[in-house]
Amino acid sequence: MGSYVKVSVPRMKDDGEQLHTQIAKIPQFIRELEGSMKSLGSCWDGPAWVTFQQQVESDILNMLEMYDWLCRYLRAMSDAEKEYGNCEEKSYSSVEKVRI
């Protein structure tokens, strides 16, 4: 028994736009986190602060890596949407040519 996935170009485009909107917010969130960490540093000192700072820096690097991955995913999704749209247009055109 075969399986298939039903795809809608407008839905793919809408999902891509929503994802883009959310991904675009990530750099600002990272800047806010860095600012909060610096503010916290003015009232905290010692080895616990150093450990906390190292962990936050590690987390930020992880966020930047995830941000990069999400940007690549979004580009692939956009490419797939365009390719699917082109195939859909060709299919409709072929069917129109066959109709009598």
Image (spheres, helix red, strand yellow):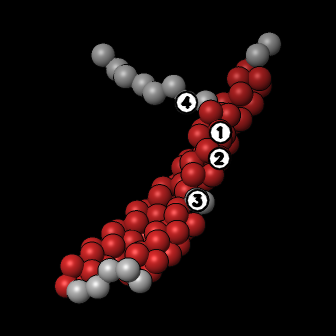
- What whole-number distance in Å separates the C-alpha atoms at marks 1 and 4? 12 Å
- In x, y percent, where is residue 86? 67, 42
- What whole-number distance in Å separates the C-alpha atoms at marks 4 and 2? 16 Å
Q: In this view of the protein, can residue 72 be seen by the observer?
A: no
**Which label's residue is closer to the chain start, 1 or 4?**
4
Q: Is residue 20 above or below residue 28?
A: above
Residue at the image position 77 percent from the left and 25 percent from the top: 97
Q: Amino acid at mark 1?
A: Asp
Q: Which residue is mark 1?
A: 14
- In x, y percent, where is residue 1? 30, 16
Q: Which residue is mark 4?
A: 7
Residue furthest to the left in view is 47
- What whole-number distance in Å separates the C-alpha atoms at marks 3 and 1? 17 Å
Secondary structure type for disc 3:
loop
Dot 3: within a 10 Å radius of its alpha carbon, few (fewer than 14), some, or many (20 or more) residues? few
Q: Nearer the viewer, mark 3 or mark 4?
A: 3
**Which label's residue is closer to the chain start, 4 or 2?**
4
Q: Amino acid at mark 2?
A: Glu
Secondary structure type for disc 2:
helix
Q: Which residue is mark 2?
A: 17
- Quadrant occupied by the C terminus: top right
